[in-house]
Every structure is written in structure tokens, then in C-alpha cells.
Image (spheres, rainbow, N blue to C red):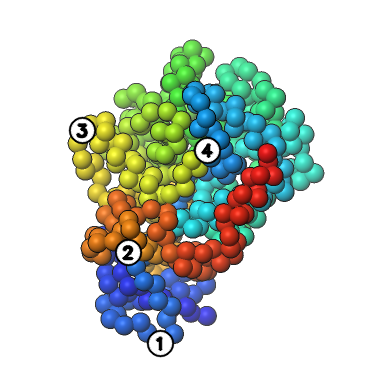
Amino acid sequence: MTTTYWLEHAWLDPEVESGVTVEIADGRITSVTRAVATPPPGATVLRGLTVPGLANAHSHAFHRALRATVQVGSGTFWTWRETMYSVADRLTPDSYHALARAVYAEMALAGITAVGEFHYLHHAPGGTPYADPNAMGEALIAAADEAGIRVTLLDTAYLSAGFGKAPDEHQARFSDGTAAAWAERVSLLKDRPHAKIGAAVHSVRAVPADQLSTVAEWAQVRGVPLHVHLSEQIAENEACQAAHGCTPTELLAEHGVLGSRTTGVHNTHLTDHDISLLGGSGTGTCMCPTTERDLADGIGPAVRLQQAGSPLSLGSDSHAVIDLFEEARGMELNERLRTHQRGHWTAAALLRAAAVDGHAALGWDDAGVIEPGAVADLVTIDLGSVRTAGAPPRLGAETAVFSAGAADVRDVIASGREVVRDGVHVRVGDVGSALTEAISALR
């Protein structure tokens, strides 16, 4: 069955076209026709500016429960982490499913059609495996399906509390004991139409150096994405230097973790040599500007990384904000503050990072564009809101990145399925109530 949409304005990278007909069958775009003055009979009309679906390349779904509560008082990333652990301690497969379903529905409302879930809550508190050793991961996969978006489950190896330190009481449920045991468990997970299984190294402090290659080889053999938190904190760099006499990036390079299917998340505190290693190997960079400023992490060298050959993607990470338009402009605005200059990226380049490049980082190489053969993801932005009113439709990328926000998303088609219509999630309904109920159950 073919479904037809008529788009009032559409960003067909790099231009905006008015009057575009898109036909969809079996979850894919079959045709794109420009300069169609009036909607064809039977076509669904999408008024506003339509852009490709966005990809949230880095998510910890349970962090959404921390919003506002971690803003009381002062502190650092490390004090914030203790509060985060207290939430992680209370999650079960059922409560995590309810929370993630609501969080992924919030993402859909923001125009996100695929998410990379950096998943390390594997076992029950204390470290005892569930009867299904992947019960927590399966809860996330089911949650994404019910929320109407795709997920790449980046199943994460997390084996130690620091260099040479056993997991603490909070981290026990994260650990499989060894990378070999991690690989055995994650190998039980299977892809499905809306879900891919990838891998992650939590960080160099959480996976002993002699076990990094096991994770990297597992991902390489399967040709799946491999992500890693990298140099988010200066303290991590200092500890790595003390333990191994090198930077985290150098350690990852030594053990075969870097490469074109690998994405470093944050990549904040890097040396010139680190940047050369990442760019030269084609390792991607996922910037998470709203989280990086919320946690006082610092501003990563995104411009230099991209110039060196590292593809850029974007993530909402801790979900202090779920808004990929804000992440895109945040990356540019951070550079403006640091350099006192404007225009480090075009708006089109920033939108690509949020769409096609983000999908590629998650293994969805055929998504993030509006063209025949691509996964059928369409996100329509209201051009008459108080934020976007007056912006010329021809400046589509500029409007999306520098004027619009998540609240301006009106319609979302994900994998050919209608997920959001007129700003309402058609599957979950009242997403705010779903979030309130799921988060309240954890307190």
C-alpha cells in the first residue's frame, strides 16, 4: 500500500522546495516529486517546513528522571553522578520500560525518529542477573517500538569503578564481570525491524585495558556501531595518564577501538595527537552540548575534530533538554563564545549532523534524508509559532536550527508510520502524564 504526503515546504538538502509530493510504501520513500502546486487527491497535507527525521545519537533514558532534581545546590559531574546512581538503583525491567516508553515518546514529539541508547543497566541491584539476562535491554527495545521510533541498543561493557578498581555497590548491576561474559550475554540479543544491536565501551576507566579489544572485536566482526564515552572529564585523563602513561584516546587506539564504525561521545579534553588519531581513523564524534554545559564538562574541539576527519553527530545524553535543534545550535553557539566569531558551520551542516550523520553513527545508513529509497521519516515544523513566525520558508535549515525548537514539531512520520499528528503523540497520547507517572514511581 502506498501513502502519499504533500509537503508545503520541504528541506531537500541543500535547498527548500515548495509543493513536494512524497510517496511511501513498506516504510520507505518510493518517490519525491517537486513543484506540485496543489495536493494530489487523497494526499495527507503537511503544512509548514518538513525536514528529515532526527537521530539522537546518545541517550541514557533513565537520566530523564533527574530533570530539575539535580539542579538544587552546586557541585561537579562527580556529585551529580551520585544522584544518578540513586535513580539507577530503583529501576526494574517493568519500571524502566514505562519510563523509557515515555522518554522515547517525548523524543518523537521533538522530531527524533531514531535513538542510540547507551545501555549499561543490565542486572538486578547487587549484580544478580535476571532470568532473562537481557531483560533490561529488551524493555528498552519494546519501549522504542511502542513509542514509534527506532533504537540502536548500544549494549555497554562496564566492568570497573576506575583503573584497577572493582565495581562499587551501585555499579555492580552494570557489570558482567569480564568482557567475555559481556560478549556472551549481548550475543543473545537480536536485531528486529525497528532495532539494531550495537556495542559500547563505557569509558577507559570502566573497561580494563586488556579487555578493550574483546569489545572492539565483537563489534568489528558483526559490523555494528561501537560507541565510547571519551575524555569527558579532565580527571579521567589524569587517571589514565597515571595508570597507563597515555591519554584515553591513545589507549583506545592501541587496543583497536578506533575506526569508522566507532563514535567517541563528548571528546571534550583532547590533545592535538588525540584529534589526529580520531580524525585519521574516521572515528566519529557525538557532541551533547546541553548536557556538556549542564554538567560543566567544557566545550569540545568539534571544529578541529571535523576538519581532521571525524564525522559529527548529536545527542541529548542526560536529557536535561530533549531538543536536537537546540543541540545543533548549541554546538555552533559554544564555538562563538569560545572564539568570538560566528559561522563555524552552515545551518545545513548542523542539520545534517542532527539527521543523516546521526543516523549513520547508529548504523541506520539509509535514513536522515528525504529521497527515494531512504527510510520514510518526515518531521514537520510549524512556521507560524512565536519562535518561527516571519522566517522566510526558503531559509529552511536556518529556521530549523536557529529559530525552531522541539515544541514547534507538529507532525512526525517514522519508518512510514504516523507517530505525531498536530503535536499529539498518536500512540502514547498524553506524554506528560506518562512521564509523570513513570518518574513518580521511582521516588
Query: Marks 1 and 4, Cα distance to the nearest angstrom?
Result: 48 Å
Q: The residue tagged with tag 3: helix, strand or loop? A: loop
Q: Which mark is nearer the camera, 3 or 4?
A: 4
Residue 17 position, x and y percent, is: 27, 69
Q: Residues within 10 Å of mark 1 (few under 14, many from 20)?
A: few
Whether residue 201 is situated above or below residue 272 in the rendered picture: below
Residue 166's label in the rendered image is none
Q: Which residue is mark 2?
A: 383
Q: Which residue is mark 1?
A: 41
Q: Nearer the viewer, residue 183 or 321?
A: 321
Residue 340's label in the rendered image is 3
Q: Residue at x 50, y 53 (%)?
A: 107
Kindly indicate whether the residue at mark 2 contacts the one at mark 1 (C-beta within 8 angstroms): no
Q: Which mark is nearer the camera, 1 or 4?
A: 4
Q: The residue tagged with tag 1: helix, strand or loop? A: loop
Query: Marks 2 and 4, Cα distance to the nearest angstrom?
Result: 30 Å
Q: Residue at x 69, y 34 (%)?
A: 89
Query: Marks 3 and 1, Cα distance to the nearest angstrom?
Result: 52 Å
Quarter location, residue 441: top right
Q: Amino acid at mark 4?
A: Ala
- Closer to the chain start, of discs 2 and 4, is 4
* Residue 221 visible here: no
Residue at the extreme right: 131
Residue 287 position, x and y percent, is: 40, 39
Q: Which residue is mark 4?
A: 68
Q: Residue at x 54, y 32 (%)?
A: 70
Kindly indicate whether the residue at mark 4 contacts the one at mark 3 (C-beta within 8 angstroms): no
Quarter location, residue 51: bottom left
Q: From the viewer's perspective, tell me whether residue 129 is left or right of residue 110.
A: right
Q: Nearer the viewer, residue 387 or 211?
A: 387
